[in-house]
Amino acid sequence: MSQQQSADNVSIDDIPVDIDNTQSEDIDPADVPDEIKSITRGLAGEHPPTNPLVVLKAARWWHIHGKGGTDPAFRWAIEWARHLATDTPSDVGRFDEFLKYLVTVGFADEPHELQ
């Protein structure tokens, strides 16, 4: 069954893409879809997702709605997907940057609360 989509609100994989809020520096945690919020929190936790397609779904959302290719959540998701695909160590510095970014956008008050 097909859904009607307006020109300023489309969806990919049932995750809405708000065209008016693309490449934004200001992320409000309330605007992050629940599925993306869950994946993002999982990427910060002790048992992150192990399915690269799930991780890339979050990466795509952060790239579109965050700071593009420089968004720390996007960069960490790509780094984690690379780790899963190649079984090589991930960049700890990028992970720390990701945690600090999640605090900045309001996912937690302190980085340790995310893990």
Image: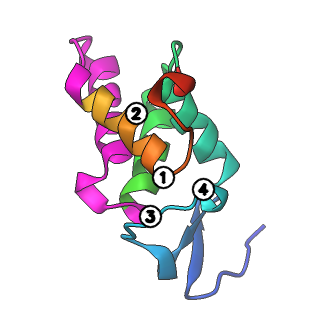
- The foreground one among 1 and 63 is 63
Residue type highlighted by circle 1: Val
Mark 3–mark 2 distance (CA, rounded to whole Å): 18 Å
Judging by the rendered image, the residue that carries numbered circle 1 is 105
Residue type highlighted by circle 2: Leu
Judging by the rendered image, the residue that carries numbered circle 3 is 65
Mark 4–mark 2 distance (CA, rounded to whole Å): 16 Å
Judging by the rendered image, the residue that carries numbered circle 4 is 32
- The foreground one among 66 and 11 is 66
What stretch of residues is rendered in magenta?
64-93
Which of discs 1 and 3 lies nearer the camera? The answer is 1
- Local packing at callout 1 (Cα closer than 10 Å; few below 14, some 14-19, many 20+) is some
Which of discs 3 and 2 lies nearer the camera? The answer is 2
Tag 3 or tag 1, which sits nearer the N-term?
A: 3
Judging by the rendered image, the residue that carries numbered circle 2 is 99
- The foreground one among 57 and 104 is 104
Callout 1 secondary element: loop
